[in-house]
Amino acid sequence: MQETSTSRGPHEHREPQLTEPTVVQDVFITGAAVEVADGYVRVVGWTQLPTVSGQMPERRISTRNVYPNAVFEDMVAQWRRGKSSRK
């Protein structure tokens, strides 16, 4: 997993250590909506639930994330590099 960060100051030579004092669960989503705003990108992810006969389809929000533009752009670039290397 590659890291993406915006905390690159003039005196920083390395990124701070990445720690996980509380276990954060992975969230699997089946769809997402992306809102691009001034200086940030907001992503709302959902999971579509299976339907039982007679029930209305339902999409439940699973995650909401807000990223500075630079972080989101780095994530997309990493995704593209990873996708192109698998061809």
Image (cartoon, rainbow, N blue to C red):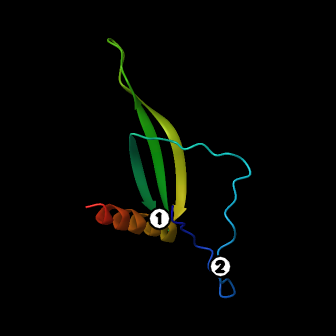
Q: Where residue 11 appears, x then y in whole percent? A: 69, 87
Residue at the bottom extreme, as displayed:
10
Q: Nearer the viewer, residue 35 or 64?
A: 64
Q: Where residue 38 appears, x then y in whole percent? A: 48, 67
Q: Where residue 30 appears, x then y in whole percent? A: 39, 39
Measure how far apart labels 1 and 2 are at the Cα level: 20 Å
Residue at image position (42%, 66%) is 78
Residue at image position (65%, 74%) is 15
Residue at image position (36%, 20%) is 51
Tell me whether the residue at label 1 lies in contact with that at label 2, contact meaning CB atoms closer than 8 angstroms. no
Q: Quick one: quadrant of the C terminus?
A: bottom left
Dot 2 corresponds to which residue? 14
The amino acid at mark 1 is: Phe
Residue at the top extreme, as displayed:
54
- Which secondary structure lies at badge 2? loop
Label 2 Cα crowd, 10 Å radius (few <14 / some 14-19 / many 20+) = few
Dot 1 corresponds to which residue? 72
Task: Name which quarter of the figure residue 18 lies in.
Answer: bottom right
